[in-house]
Amino acid sequence: MNAADAGAPADADLQRLRAALAGTAESPRPVADLRLPLTLGHLLSDKVVAGLRPAAVLVPLIMRDDGVHLLLTRRSELLRNHKGQISFPGGSRDSGDVSFAATALREAYEEVGLPPASVEIIGYLDDYPVLSGFRITPVVGIVGQVFAPALATAEVAEMFDLPLARVLAADAFEKKILDRDGITVPFFELNYGSYRIWGATAGILWELRTLLLQGDAA
């Protein structure tokens, strides 16, 4: 299949994503209003969540010959938190960042060399509190051009594509339980090839999937 053959379905997927995310903003939502059914936020009070460190990740969508893909990274084994795990490019919000979108774009450039000017922000998913003490704002953007990855190897071991079609597959996700420090935390897991995607990253993908499928049913 060439790019021309794939263009119409891929464009349709992007239009579905735009419609699903229309009207979303990066304003924090109260814990009780979070849409995700399996998130640490439902186990914590608004006061505790308010004390978490703000962070953002970029959920990058890119057109390939076979449709829309998401760009993901495998974190370096040298990192203190979440080493070796699959994640989106992102990190803590700096004092100089004017928005969570600015944080996500800066971190994506620093981690994988994605030029901020090549990304069109199309919306936001629910904040995701995590056990490591962060409240993550997922920022969804379309990568408008092919770029040459430049990985910050101290943070990122590799970058790879995850087809959107895999996220939307009926058998994509499993629900599991993590027991940590006396807290029982439900989470999602998605396996793709040799990659085990779980925790916050899988939860973000689950919400993206849910929004798309709800839009299809409307």
Image (spheres, helix red, strand yellow):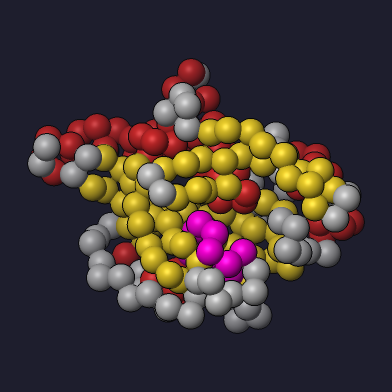
Side of 124 relative to 73 (left or right): right
Residue 136, position as x, y percentages in the image: 64, 58
At 23% across and 47% down in the image, what residue appears? 64
Q: Main secondary structure of the magenta part?
A: loop
Give the magenta range: 82-91
Based on the displayed image, in which of its 4 quarters is residue 138 positioned?
A: bottom right
At 74% across and 68% down in the image, what residue appears? 53
Residue 175, position as x, y percentages in the image: 63, 33
Residue 167 higher or lower than 60, as above or below: above
At 88% across and 50% down in the image, what residue appears? 182
Residue 138 versus residue 86: which sits nearer the camera? Answer: 86
Q: Is residue 5 magenta?
A: no
Based on the displayed image, in which of its 4 quarters is residue 152 positioned?
A: bottom left
Based on the displayed image, in which of its 4 quarters is residue 163 positioned?
A: top left
In this rendering, does residue 33 appear at all?
A: yes
At 72% across and 39% down in the image, what residue appears? 177
Residue 120 versus residue 60: which sits nearer the camera? Answer: 60
Q: Residue furthest top?
A: 217
Q: Is residue 83 magenta?
A: yes
In this rendering, does residue 35 appear at all?
A: no
